[in-house]
């Protein structure tokens, strides 16, 4: 983004990772839940196929562009302002697929109104244990997880930052907190600021390369 009033790489300091979740690749129930069925439908439609996302530059937008390259299909991006608009369009047959948060689509998948083709992580997730991973459907290089984090303003006194981070990590490591997060479709193995920093660096590299390679416009 060219007009951000802040620099995300310089203006914040990591405190703790709060929750991690893959996205779910979902299609209308009539398409079928297997990757072969979904890909056959998308490839048959060619450039007439479309996918929705929660906005330009969102995980669902950039993730689907990675998936298109990995599985060799085309689909027009249709941005919405939130997940409800995308799911409504999917249910109505106006879209062919989308990558959406598990929490927003799990009830629709369980009721048979949408079909889950895969989750966007390299391994299956306990959140949708019967749904294949990216590796299982042939997209071995795709590993997309969205996450929440707690950050502090850059320049916070180092001792204060360390104390605050240590307190947050202790809270987030508790079994009751992990259970509450899981009920909201988030998992958490390591909340440490070091792990958060690794995720930030890896995602920045992956998405910067994608945006440059495909010349994606995010504004």
Image (cartoon, rainbow, N blue to C red):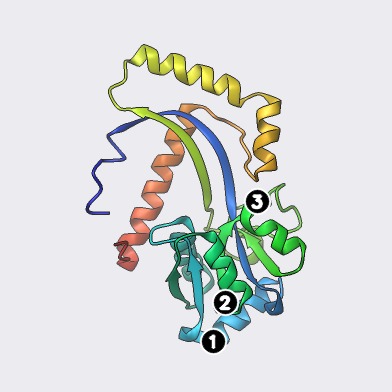
| Numbered mark located on residue 136 in the image | none
Tell me which residue sits at (65%, 29%) in the image.
Answer: 177
- CB contact under 8 Å: marks 3 and 2: no
Query: Which sits in the foreground, 58 or 125?
Result: 58
Label 2 Cα neighbours within 10 Å, binned few <14 / some 14-19 / many ≥20:
many
Image spot of residue 155 (x, y percent)? 28, 22
Give the labeled residue for mark 3: 123
SS of the residue under disc 1: helix
Disc ID at residue 96: 2
Dot 3 crowding, Cα within 10 Å, few <14, some 14–19, many 20+: some
Q: Nearer the viewer, residue 13 or 109?
A: 109
Q: Nearer the N terminus, badge 3 or badge 1? A: 1
> Which residue is disc 1 drawn over?
45
Badge 3 vs badge 1, beta-carbon distance below 8 Å: no
Residue drawn 53% across the image and 22% down it: 168
Looking at the rendering, in which quadrant would you find the C terminus?
bottom left
- How far apart marks 3 and 2 lie (CA) works out to 24 Å
Q: Nearer the viewer, mark 1 or mark 2?
A: 2
Which numbered disc flags the more N-terminal residue, 1 or 2? 1
Image coordinates for residue 11, horizontal then vertical, percent: 28, 33
Marks 1/2 in contact by CB < 8 Å: the verdict is: yes
Where disc 3 sits, the SS reads loop
Label 3 – label 1 distance at C-alpha: 29 Å
In screen coordinates, is 196 left or right of 209?
right
Give the class, few, some or many, for how many residues have Cα within 10 Å of label 1's Cα (few <14, many ≥20): some
Query: Alpha-carbon distance for marks 1 and 2?
Result: 9 Å
Residue 170 occupies quadrant: top right
Q: Secondary structure at mark 2?
A: loop
The residue mark sitting in front, 3 or 1, is: 1
């Amino acid at each position: 983004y060219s007009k951000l009033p802040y620099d995300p790489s310089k203006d914040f300091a990591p405190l703790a990772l709060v929750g991690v979740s893959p996205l779910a690749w979902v299609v209308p129930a009539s398409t079928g839940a297997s990757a072969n069925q979904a890909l056959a439908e998308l490839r048959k439609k060619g450039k007439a196929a479309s996918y929705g996302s929660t906005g330009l530059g969102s995980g669902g937008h950039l993730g689907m562009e990675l998936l298109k390259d990995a599985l060799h299909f085309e689909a027009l991006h249709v941005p919405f302002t939130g997940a409800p608009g995308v799911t409504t369009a999917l249910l109505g047959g106006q879209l062919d697929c989308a990558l959406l948060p598990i929490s927003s689509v799990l009830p629709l998948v369980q009721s048979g109104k949408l079909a889950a083709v895969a989750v966007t992580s390299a391994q299956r997730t306990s959140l949708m244990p019967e749904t294949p991973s990216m590796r299982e459907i042939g997209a071995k290089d795709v590993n997309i997880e969205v996450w929440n984090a707690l950050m502090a303003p850059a320049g916070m006194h180092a001792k204060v930052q360390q104390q605050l981070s240590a307190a947050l990590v202790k809270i987030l490591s508790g079994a009751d907190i992990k259970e509450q997060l899981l009920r909201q479709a988030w998992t958490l193995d390591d909340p440490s600021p070091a792990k958060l920093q690794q995720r930030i660096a890896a995602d920045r590299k992956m998405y910067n390369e994608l945006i440059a390679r495909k010349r994606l416009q995010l504004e």
